[in-house]
Amino acid sequence: MPENTGLSKIFAGAFAVLTVSAIAGLVTMIVVYKVEISEMNPTPRPTPPSTTLSPPPVMRLPGSLVPERYIIFLQPHLYTKIIQEVNVTSPNQTMLFTGNSTLHFRCVQKTGQIYLHSRDLAISDPHLVDKDTNDRIKVNSWKHHEDETDFLELELNGFLEAGGNYSLSLSFEGAISQSLDALFVSTYSEGGPASEDDTDAERFLAATHLEPTDARRLFPCLDEPEMKAVFELTVIHRRGTTALGNGAQSVSNVLDDEWKYTRFQPTQLMSTYLFAFVVSEFKSINSPSRVRIETYARPEAIDAGHAEYAANITGQILAYFEELFDIEYQPNKLQQIAVPDLNSGAMENWGLITYQEGALLYEEGVSSFLRKEVIASTIAHELAHHWFGNLVTMKWWNELWLKEGFATYWSPFAVDKVEPSFKIKDVEVMQELHAAFEEDALESSRPLSADPGEVQTTSEISGMFDSISYSKGAVVLRMLANVVGENVFNNGIRMYLKEHQGGNTDQNDLWDYIELARRDKSGLRAAQLMDPWTNQKGYPVITIDTKNGEIRQKQFLLNDTMDSRLRKEEFISKKGEWILANVDCYGYYRVNYNPENWQRLLTQLETNPDRIPLMNRGQLVDDAFNLARAKLIDVTLALNATRFLSKEREFLPWESAERNLRYFTLMFDRTEVYLQEKVRGLYSFFRNYTDESRVPSDQSLQHNQIYAIQLACSNGLPECIEMAQDKFAAWMNGNGTNRIHPNLRTVIYCQAVAAGGKKEWEFAWGEFQRATDPSEKEQLEYALSCTRKTWLLNRFLEYTLDPEKIRLMDVASTISHISENVAGQLPAWNFVRAHWDYVSQGDPVMLINQVTRRFSTTFELKERTTVTSAGMWLIDGWLEYFARDKESHSAFRAMQQAIEETKVNIQWVRDNKDAILEWFERETAHLD
Ligand code: BES
Ligand code: ZN
């Protein structure tokens, strides 16, 4: 197996100059970028068509009241099991919850009204007391505002005085949601999957998911992140169930034959979106740790040991962050729970983290080894939120990146500490970099710190959970850490956390502490340095001319022309050697070179690729293709940058090339021939392992073994397809014994179903329904989307409408997978439009991104102009439909992006089709 060459070694000797100049270059480029930006006219943001003529309501609370403490009682009336009584025709399940709450608050500005957030709650019995005098203040009336504010306004008989202390009690009731938001019901079956007519095994649990703005659907509250308070919760729940909350249980007692109550210790000062509770029949296991850590899951999963991996690493990850940030995890317990239905991968509720089963449970012998990476990364991400988000919270949602970008940034550090063999850092960083590059190259992107005026409604707030907040947030932090030095960065972070714990911040608070930690005060201040990266959208492309040392830069947009220049001695190639900028991709920018330097780099790649650091090997390919898309270099140069792959054995360069060539595969048959030849070497490299259903011990090579099979099979390498079919057939005919290695299941199931027909598909469907393990279910779900038979794909699409067949939380990903399949694009797109209301309940932004982007891109690349224009018309028409439909606004920007990318691509294909075709014919001519 090839050794992972260290960087220092690479740049010893002849290339010594580069390490130094690359870092210096980075700082220079930031300076240049800054200069240019101030000269640049800001591009006007596209304004969504206005849907109403009246002025928008003021969306923020008036700020006259400061919450201190909520005393809350909540009673979900849900049964965990439906008891079918004799003579009773309808089952006894009920979706009602009731509650009451007392909010203790201070008044800081005299007012005759109280504004709270409340949505879909029936409110009664307001009781307002002046705590300083013990007098009751009458509430004359109360009403819900009929707009998007979700305000509950109470009209008082008299005034609250500034400096006064008050308490407001309210009773309320609402419905337990069946669409995975607010307080919702999740279902599972005990003792394996329930058959259609067997409801005996069906179980129900109630759980919450309140971020970002659903706390107001659970109890009336001041539902803004800056309105922190202490929460004291009592849950009244059915006997035989367990209630979990943010705090540790303080008392639990039986009330009567049916009910008991559980009271929790008061929380720390926290934002409403972090509030949570769960009522279930789940069991738990403990972790070895300073704080009490409990991992909960379905009793069967616990008994089978599926929570053990998570339980083993959680304490270690927590300890790692405690030491790194030099602040202990304060609550006296940490519970985490695998909820069978959950709308996001995981949610960092304080003291009670919720996860999808697939992000927490690991089944030895069934789950792929690589599943551990997902579990560890998810746990690390959510634990990082304890410091970034829970302890120190963003002032407002426009700077969501201050928690999501940070959690994304820290996660791989913790995983690397706990599981060094995963070598997760490079792959993770490149993933975030590419996700950010892709979204941020569009005119319809947004600045990392968004304009607060544009983040007001619930759907605008939901729209902030995008690749900009997560991925750009993380890579920009990595760049800053690299510029100031990791030690300085971490010291600054520790001071920032200590100073602001329990409070709220904006990005300037962060820059202040990074600045404070810097001993070398020369050059730009942190705030100046970061300003262009966080306050404007997009990123630069740097063009280096190694003949004269000239550096030019402009914003990388798929169609833009702004330019500025600078000259640097260290960028002149003196003895005809190549120069590589942005070593290890710390900078958030693309790099272009003069043709001579490109040629030297490509020659180096073909002769001795290891002289170029791994991340850069991937990035050179990605840059080349994207520069070609933006018409900054010739497309044949990008294609030439894939030649070296025949000898490449690492994952990152392959991943880059495959992602960029994917669309070509659909357009030119020759791509398949070309890739088949390139991947042959990679496939044989792993062949002995694969044939014997074994995997290499090095975790990072395991990724590439899977990739080799996927690429080889999907590009038609006969020995690969045969292998997949043989292994799958052995399983089908093996009376239930599956000998396929867990790592290889996803790819082999998929390729076998793709190469097979009805028999293979129906076998996979049967296994899918039988499976209870989340890993196995996910692998089979994916395989089902791989068939080339449109009628089977249509059947699968129909199944997504039946929650008994496909859980609501899996609908978006299932449809996305189908739309990634060439045969599934049109069916998936038509299906999404026909069933929008149902399918968009899960994750509408993801759905639009996946389904329309792939669809439109592919169509233009195939250049079926009639369909293209029809497709475009559909998207445009649909966009208008969206604009009219307020609920769907969070998907609005995703739609704009889809349209923009499509338009760019159509033009690009027109310009480059002939050149690409010619190139492939030339490269593959010897194979005929
Ligand atoms: N805070 C989010 C969960 C969330 C996402 C709430 C979107 C509301 C809207 C959580 O920390 C998160 O980021 N979860 C990720 C998984 C993580 C490993 C990146 C998710 O759910 O995708
Ligand atoms: Zn997060």
Image (cartoon, rainbow, N blue to C red):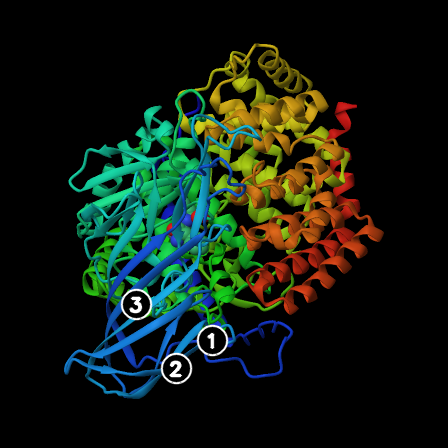
Above/below status of 602 relative to 694:
below
Choose the circle earlier in sequence order: 3 or 1: 1
Tell me if 394 is positioned left or right of 679 in this view. left
Residue 861 percent across, percent down from the top left: 74, 47
Q: In terms of secondary structure, where does tag 2 sit?
A: strand
Distance between the alpha carbons at the discs numbered 2 and 1: 31 Å
Q: Residue at x 46, y 80 (%)?
A: 58
Residue 593 percent across, percent down from the top left: 56, 52
For the residue pair 175 and 660, the one nearer the viewer reads as 175
Above/below status of 110 relative to 842:
below
Distance between the alpha carbons at the discs numbered 3 and 1: 17 Å
For the residue pair 324 and 764, the one nearer the viewer reads as 764
Contact flag, marks 2 and 1 (Cβ < 8 Å): no
Q: Which residue is drawn at 74% across and 43% down?
A: 916
Disc 2 marks a residue whose amino acid type is Ser
Disc 3 marks a residue whose amino acid type is Thr
For the residue pair 875 and 27, the one nearer the viewer reads as 875
User: Crowding near pointer 2: few (<14 within 10 Å), some, many (20+)?
Assistant: few
- Say which quadrant the N terminus sits in: top left
Query: In the picture, residue 170 is in which quadrant?
Result: bottom left
Q: Which mark is residue 453?
A: 1
Q: Nearer the viewer, mark 2 or mark 1?
A: 2
Q: In terms of secondary structure, where does tag 1 sit?
A: helix
Disc 1 marks a residue whose amino acid type is Gly
Residue 327 percent across, percent down from the top left: 18, 52
Q: Name the residue under label 3.
A: 505
User: Crowding near pointer 1: few (<14 within 10 Å), some, many (20+)?
Assistant: few
Q: Name the residue under label 2.
A: 141
